[in-house]
Structure formats: structure tokens, C-alpha cells
Image (tube, coloured by chain):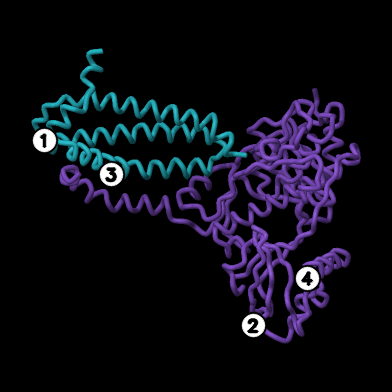
């Protein structure tokens, strides 16, 4: 509960402004995507070649998506500290919560894709 | 973002070239093809007969991954697999774009489903005379040479209606169908009786009329190529089902899988939905092979990948085309060679068939040929 109480974007927004937070996440997204783009291409191309192992590759793609968003958060955090070295707002709980939430969404979406959409796609 | 760029600039400078090299390997297409195993697709998922009989087992067609112009990375990934086949693109595959190859593949699948419905309904009507089917003969565009004038205006699958030849002579699709029928009888090409060739000698430009996929008529003036003395158009004869007068009604669902090689299994599945006796007998049935309008089974490509797919999916029965001895290409013999190469025992599940009747007889057999 103590942890959850700390989860708020308000102190960070008030300290550095919304524009700076968004800019940090944009930078995080750009650099994380640059790093992960070849990974996604490799996994998709391998899935096409080894279609009989498609479920394995879809799981790997979901895991890669999770790492991708974790890297976005990591770069965003780095960008915030580079913008303001003496950042006072405790951003760790918010980032952990945000990463967990997105991972849960990816997981639910991934399971839906595997068990609902994939059997419909390959007919 | 600028802060990150400043912070990582030394790394970006060092890694930019290797990064571009990796992307080149990952995205550069090669003029090769790659065939790898795919999976099984239950026919019931794409064709459903209204109030059709239930089946205990499954009947599935087998699909493979046929990658035209794979990237360098895909090619290398497939090259080292025991299950893949690769080679240089040749023939029409080399001339067409990947999009056009896909369109042709879906046209093949569409006409194959129609052939499967016709054969299955006619076969089932021998058991139940309330089953009726009507169909029409259609001449459709199946091939386009690069020198075809108005190349983009004419789509694969458009229906040929007529052509205005020398002296205002109208050559209809029926005239051309009669010509094609005569070719079947004589079993050899005869350009002298080809009505399009016969009535296009005086001029260079002739008006052709087609129906597009929405049934809208359009006309184009096509020019004969000086070098080949041809228009560059390949027409194929297909039988298309008239759904309004066909009983019982059937529905088709969208499918991502193209090609005609599911024809035999589609025929068996539709036939099984139409007759009270379940020919699956609880078995997992798969196979491959084109279905011809007379019920005979045509040869297919990608035998190795299909055998592997069937083996990995642990099927009970796998039908494979078995052509007569004087045919130059025998899928069954190739399948046996693949089994030997990959150390797969073909005994009991690999069944050669040359006609849909053979497949039905096999399945109707009490044990279905499978050792219990």
C-alpha cells in the first residue's frame, strides 16, 4: 500500500513540466525502438521461415515487446536525470507501476492473440 | 531526446554502419524462393455446408510457407534447415511481383474451392438426390506477359467476355471454350483453330471486353506484340458454382492460405458434410493434391515440406497424389524419397491416391487401412 501511495506522476510533472516528461519518453521510444527494430524483424522473419514453430516465435515476440517497453522506461529515466540532475521526485514507483501495467496488457493481448486470433488467422 | 542523443553520440557514430549493414541483411530481397513446412488448416473452418452432418475426426488441407524473394537473412535461416527447399526464381515467378504471385495464388485457391464443391456435390448426389449443383464455365485471366498492353487495367481473375476481330467478327468466350475443348480431344496445341489467333491477322489493335471482380464490364484495346505476334494474355477455363441454385447452401469464410493444393481434402470434407456416414471415423485426416473436375487428383509442389508438416502434426492419414506411370512427376515417389531422407516411416499413414474415389474408398474401409 505504501508503494502504491507513492505512485503519482504529479510531483514529477510539477517539478519538470509535462513537456519535459513527454520529451524524455519520446527519446526513450526512439532509441529503444532503434535497438529493438532489428530484433523484431529477425523474430518475424524467423517465424515466417519456421512457421511450424510459430507459437514459440509469437511468445518470443511478446517477450521482446516487454523488454522494449522496459527499455523505453530506462531511457526515459536516463533522459529525465540528464535534463535535471538533482531530480527530487521519486520516479521509481511510477516507472515500476507503469512497466508492470504495460507488461500485463502485453501479456493479456499476447494470450488473446495466441489462443483466439492465431487459430482464426491460419485457416 | 537531445540529451540522450548527446549522451550516446559516440556509440551512435561507431554503431551506425554496422547497424545499416544488419538492416540491409534483414531487408534486402533476393531473387530466390524458399519453401518451408507450414501447418494444417481444417477445411470446416473455411467451408461450411448449411445443416451439414457432423464429423468426429478432422479433415485438413496442408499448407507450406512458399516465400518468394526472401530477405538474405530469411534465405540463410532456411538454407540450413533440413526441411527447407530453396532455389532461384524462374518462369512466371521471376516475372511477377510478390503481390501478383499472391493474387494468382488466391485465384488458384478460389477456383480450387469451386472445383472441390462441384466434385463433392456431384459425388454426394449419387447418394442423396436432393443434392443439386449448377455451375457455369468461365474464361478467366490467369497470366499476363510483360509486353501486354494495358497491363495494369486487366486484373488476374477478370472474366473474358468477347473480342472484336477482323472484319467486325466477334469472338465470344464460348467460341474460345469450344476451342479449348477441342484441344482436350486432340491433346495437342492447335493454333490454326484458335479463334483469337484466327481473327486477329489484319490489324495490330483489337478491342477486348472483360468483366472485373464486381461483374462490371470494361473494354480495352490491346496491341499485338511485334516480336511474338501475341497479345500476352493467358486465359484459363474454370467452372464456377452458381450458389443460388445449389442445394444445400454452403458458406465460405475468408482464409489466408492460397493455392490449389487443398482441393482433394476440400472435396473430401465437403462430401463428408453432405452424407450421413462419417468417413473420418474419428481420425485426423490430412493430405494434399489438386482436384480436377472429373475427380482426378493433380500433382502439387512442396512435397518435402508437406510430408514434414504432416509428420510433425501427427496425422493418422495423409493423402498424396499418385500419378500414372507415364507422368513425368510423381508426388508419391518423391514423398517416399523424402521419408527415407528424413528417416520417417511412411507405413500406415501415407496413402497414394489418383482419384477422389480412391480416397473415399480408403476411408470407408472399416479400419481405414490403419493398423489398430
Residue at x 42% of width, y 27% of height: A107
Give the residue pinned by disc 3. Answer: A30
Secondary structure under tag 1 reads loop
How far apart are the two marked residues, 4 and 1, measured between alpha carbons?
79 Å
Q: Residue B353: x percent and y percent?
A: 81, 43
Disc on res. A84:
1
Q: Residues within 10 Å of mark 3 (few under 14, many from 20)?
A: some
Q: Could you tell me how far apart the alpha carbons at marks 3 and 1 are, in whole angstroms?
A: 20 Å
Labels 2, 1: front one:
1
Alpha-carbon span between mark 3 and mark 2:
55 Å
Chain bearing tag 1 is A
Residue at horizontal 83%, vertical 30%?
B368
Q: Earlier in the sequence, mark 3 or mark 1?
A: 3
Q: Which residue is mark 2?
A: B226
Q: CA distance from mark 2 to mark 4?
A: 24 Å
Are tags 2 and 4 found on a single chain?
Answer: yes
Colour of the chain lettered A? cyan
Report the Cα–Cα distance between label 2 and label 1.
74 Å
Q: Residues within 10 Å of mark 1 (few under 14, many from 20)?
A: few
Task: Report which quarter residue B131 is drawn in.
Answer: top right
**Marks 3 and 4: which is nearer the front?**
4
The location of residue B286, given as percent across then percent down, is 72, 36
Dots 3, 1 in contact, CB < 8 A: no
- Which image quadrant is residue B372 in? top right
Q: CA distance from mark 3 to mark 4?
A: 60 Å
Q: Chain of mark 2?
A: B
Amino acid at each position: 500500500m505504501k508503494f502504491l501511495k507513492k505512485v503519482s506522476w504529479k510531483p514529477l510533472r510539477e517539478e519538470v513540466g509535462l513537456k519535459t516528461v513527454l520529451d524524455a519518453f519520446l527519446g526513450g521510444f526512439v532509441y529503444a525502438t532503434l535497438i529493438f527494430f532489428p530484433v523484431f524483424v529477425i523474430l518475424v522473419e524467423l517465424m515466417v521461415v519456421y512457421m511450424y514453430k510459430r507459437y514459440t516465435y509469437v511468445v518470443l515476440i511478446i517477450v521482446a515487446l516487454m523488454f522494449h517497453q522496459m527499455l523505453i522506461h530506462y531511457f526515459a529515466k536516463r533522459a529525465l536525470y540528464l535534463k535535471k540532475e538533482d531530480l527530487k521526485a521519486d520516479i521509481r514507483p511510477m516507472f515500476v507501476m507503469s512497466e508492470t501495467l504495460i507488461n500485463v496488457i502485453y501479456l493479456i493481448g499476447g494470450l488473446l492473440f495466441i489462443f483466439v486470433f492465431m487459430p482464426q488467422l491460419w485457416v | 531526446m537531445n540529451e540522450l542523443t548527446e549522451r550516446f553520440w559516440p556509440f551512435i557514430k561507431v554503431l551506425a554502419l554496422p547497424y545499416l549493414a544488419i538492416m540491409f541483411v534483414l531487408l534486402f530481397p533476393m531473387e530466390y524462393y524458399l519453401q518451408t513446412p507450414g501447418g494444417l488448416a481444417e477445411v470446416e473452418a473455411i467451408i461450411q455446408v448449411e445443416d451439414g452432418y457432423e464429423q468426429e475426426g478432422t479433415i485438413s488441407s496442408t499448407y507450406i510457407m512458399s516465400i518468394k524473394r526472401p530477405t538474405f537473412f530469411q534465405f540463410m535461416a532456411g538454407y540450413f534447415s533440413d526441411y527447407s527447399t530453396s532455389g532461384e526464381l524462374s518462369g512466371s515467378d521471376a516475372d511477377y511481383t510478390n503481390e501478383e504471385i499472391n493474387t494468382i495464388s488466391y485465384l488458384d485457391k478460389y477456383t480450387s474451392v469451386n472445383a472441390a464443391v462441384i466434385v463433392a456435390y456431384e459425388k454426394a448426389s449419387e447418394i442423396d438426390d436432393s443434392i443439386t449443383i449448377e455451375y457455369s464455365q468461365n474464361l478467366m485471366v490467369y497470366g499476363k506477359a510483360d509486353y501486354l498492353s494495358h497491363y495494369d487495367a486487366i486484373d488476374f481473375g477478370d472474366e473474358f467476355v468477347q473480342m472484336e476481330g477482323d472484319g467486325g467478327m466477334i469472338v465470344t468466350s464460348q467460341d474460345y471454350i469450344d476451342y479449348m475443348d477441342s484441344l482436350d480431344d486432340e491433346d495437342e496445341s492447335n493454333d490454326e483453330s484458335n479463334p483469337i489467333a484466327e481473327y486477329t491477322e489484319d490489324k495490330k489493335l483489337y478491342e477486348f471486353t472483360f468483366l472485373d471482380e464486381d461483374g462490371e464490364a470494361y473494354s480495352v484495346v490491346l496491341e499485338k506484340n511485334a516480336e511474338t505476334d501475341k497479345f500476352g494474355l493467358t486465359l484459363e477455363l474454370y467452372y464456377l458454382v452458381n450458389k443460388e441454385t445449389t442445394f444445400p447452401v454452403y458458406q465460405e469464410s475468408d482464409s489466408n492460405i492460397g493455392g490449389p493444393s487443398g482441393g482433394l481434402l476440400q472435396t473430401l470434407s465437403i462430401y463428408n458434410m453432405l452424407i450421413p456416414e462419417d468417413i473420418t471415423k474419428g481420425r485426423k485426416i490430412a493430405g494434399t493434391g489438386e482436384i480436377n473436375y472429373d475427380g482426378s487428383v493433380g500433382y502439387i509442389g512442396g512435397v518435402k515440406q508437406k510430408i514434414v508438416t504432416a509428420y510433425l502434426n501427427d496425422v493418422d492419414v495423409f493423402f498424396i497424389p499418385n500419378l500414372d506411370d507415364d507422368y513425368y512427376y510423381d508426388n508419391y515417389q518423391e514423398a517416399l524419397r523424402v521419408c527415407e531422407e528424413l528417416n520417417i516411416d511412411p507405413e500406415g499413414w501415407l496413402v497414394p491416391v489418383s482419384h477422389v474415389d480412391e480416397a473415399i474408398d480408403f476411408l470407408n474401409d472399416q479400419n481405414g487401412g490403419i493398423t489398430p
